Image (spheres, rainbow, N blue to C red):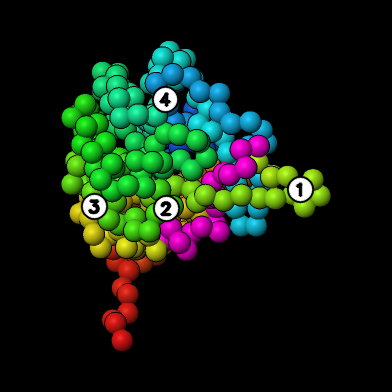
Amino acid sequence: MNSQRDPDLRVKIGRLTLKNPVVVASGTFGFAQEFEDFFDLNVLGAIIPKGISLKPMMGNPPPRVFETEGGILNSIGLQNPGFQGFVQDRLPYFKNLKTHLIINIFGNSPTEYIELARRFDEVPGISGLEMNVSCPNVEKGGMVFGCDPLLAHTLVRKVRKSTKLTLLVKLSPNVTDIASIAKKVEDAGADAVSLVNTFRAMGVNIYSRKPELGNVIGGLSGPAIKPIALRMVWETYQRVKIPIIGMGGIMKAEDAIEFMLVGASAVQIGTANLINPQTGKEVVDGIKRYLLSNKIDRVRKLTGLFQSPPPA
């Protein structure tokens, strides 16, 4: 008989205590109901459904997704039913789940972000907000804020005043120094940062001599970006004290553990959901096995455990 106790998988993100560090990323998990036949969604630490804007959005022209080596390009264009449509048609489903619901929000102006934060603050059943200031495949919107440290600071400070909910900020990797932007949003009152979003990229069809995506430019995600995302999480961990939620090519538990070792308190599963819908549960189980086999009693002890070699 195994007398070893199960490890404590709980992690703190702002005001929230997640039952485990595994979160499903916005834009890759639909509105959750699409995945209910694959596993018990309550095993997840939190769910972040598709991003929500103030008004409905139709998204970009097709084709919107293109598979590439080691990942996918997407140019969905943030299609969503808008605040009212989400609250009326999608939110009721989440009331039956026993895990945290974090809403990813975005806008074309500070006013839209502030109004969304204010509205969601008054909606029961929501645990937190994730500000998307990093989408690379829409012509206007949050990415301009996410690439400028001062704009990011100003926007987050204004949104922080509009909500009491735990506030995450999803950062763009399409910058020179992501850690400096993370520090600015920390100073503005963010409870945590999510990094990284997708990389600006494109594909070309040599036969039609046309782009593979209808929007030409899309976002690259999947295993191809993991080494870069790891580096960005590690650099950011040196600069901020708030929790980091790491993402970028996490396909299995070992990937998630790498992110935690370099500084992430939690992780988000993205592209893997589209390949293996049970990835979220498998990563939770795999982290637990790793902790047991290494006799680590709390998952939060993994954060920052990575030891870099001393400088030459």
Residue drawn at 66 percent across, 50 percent down: 203
Q: How far apart are marks 4 and 3 (CA)?
A: 26 Å
Residue bearing mark 3: 183
**Mark 4–mark 2 contact, CB under 8 Å?**
no
Residue range corresponding to the magenta coloring: 214-230
How many marks can you see? 4
Q: What element carries label 1?
A: loop
Residue drawn at 34 percent across, 58 percent down: 177
Q: How far apart are marks 4 and 2 (CA)?
A: 22 Å
Using the image as rendered, state which of residue 58 and residue 291 is in the foreground: 58
Give x and y (percent) for residue 217: 58, 44
Check disc 3: other Cα within 10 Å, few if <14, some if 14-19, many if 20+: many
| Front tag of 4 and 1 | 1
The amino acid pointed to by label 2 is: Pro
Residue drawn at 22 percent across, 55 percent down: 240
Of callouts 3 and 2, the N-terminal one: 2
| Front tag of 2 and 1 | 1
Of callouts 4 and 1, the N-terminal one: 4
Q: What element carries label 2?
A: loop
Quarter of the C terminus within the rendering? bottom left
Of callouts 4 and 3, the N-terminal one: 4
Q: Residue 173 carries which label?
A: 2
